[in-house]
Amino acid sequence: MRTKIPVYEQIAIDIANRIYNEKYKVGEKIHGRSTLASEYNVSPETVRKAIKILEDVEIVKSEKGAGVVISSRENALTYINRFSNLESVKDMEKTLRKIIVEREKLDAELFQTIEKIVDYSGKLRYTNLLVPLEIEINEDCLQIGKTISEMKFWQNTGGTIVGLKREGEIIISPGPYASIEAGDILLVIGNEHTYNRVIGFMKE
């Protein structure tokens, strides 16, 4: 009976392979958690666990102000060799790809649902609390560059960000590590006071 390897460890192995194959090179900074989470279609917490494994075996290190930096290609090879059974690695790759495909299907369904809600929101914007408001982030917004967690968005506005439109795409449930960029459109749910609170907060 083959032991099932957790998704976060499969991601750690994949990143280690990228480092060994020099797709990521020593001294370079690894993408942020939210970017990796989007790439692997998992939560930022799953990516955090994967990065922690790589830190524990000294493949990467966290540097204050610099993020997660690749520190050793040799240690990456040592870690990969722990999973040297080729068939097992192939099985893990198949499992990971299957999970990604399933997640993409779920995201597509969520995207379609959000699109329907957004299309319907114009008429019911101020009468239905479950219809998201669309808040566009202008160049002069003082919250640009901050994550949702850093802004303490809910605490300051009473609204909850359920989606984020960026360059024609919608990010569903972007999570606390997603940062705000100029041109973004936030999809926010809340009460009848939420819109004005959010607009005011973004100008602070």
Image: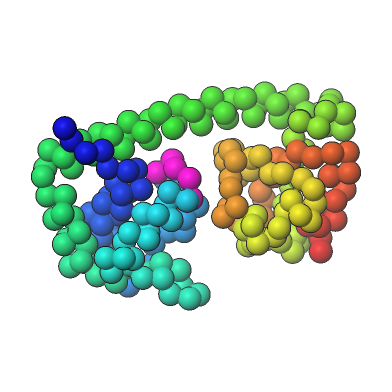
Residue 123 screen position, x and y as percent: 84, 25
Occupied quadrant, residue 138: bottom right
Residue at figure coordinates x 80%, y 51% from the top left: 157
Residue at figure coordinates x 40%, y 54% from the top left: 49
Occupied quadrant, residue 146: bottom right
Does the rendering let one see residue 26? no
Magenta region:
40-44
Apparent side of residue 199 relative to residue 34 in the rendered image (left or right): right
Quarter of the picture containing the N terminus is top left
Quarter of the picture containing the C terminus is bottom right
Magenta segment includes 197:
no
What count of labels does the image hold? 0
- Viewer-nearest residue: 185 or 130: 130
Name the outermost residue toward the bottom. 64
Apparent side of residue 6 relative to residue 158 in the rendered image (left or right): left
Residue 192 screen position, x and y as percent: 88, 38
Residue at figure coordinates x 43%, y 48% from the top left: 46
Rendered position, 98 above or below 89: above
Does the rendering let one see residue 51? yes
Q: How is the image coloured?
A: rainbow
Residue at figure coordinates x 75%, y 24% from the top left: 120
Apparent side of residue 56 relative to residue 106 in the rendered image (left or right): left
Judged by its main secondary structure, the magenta piece is loop
Residue 13 screen position, x and y as percent: 26, 51
Residue 188 screen position, x and y as percent: 73, 41
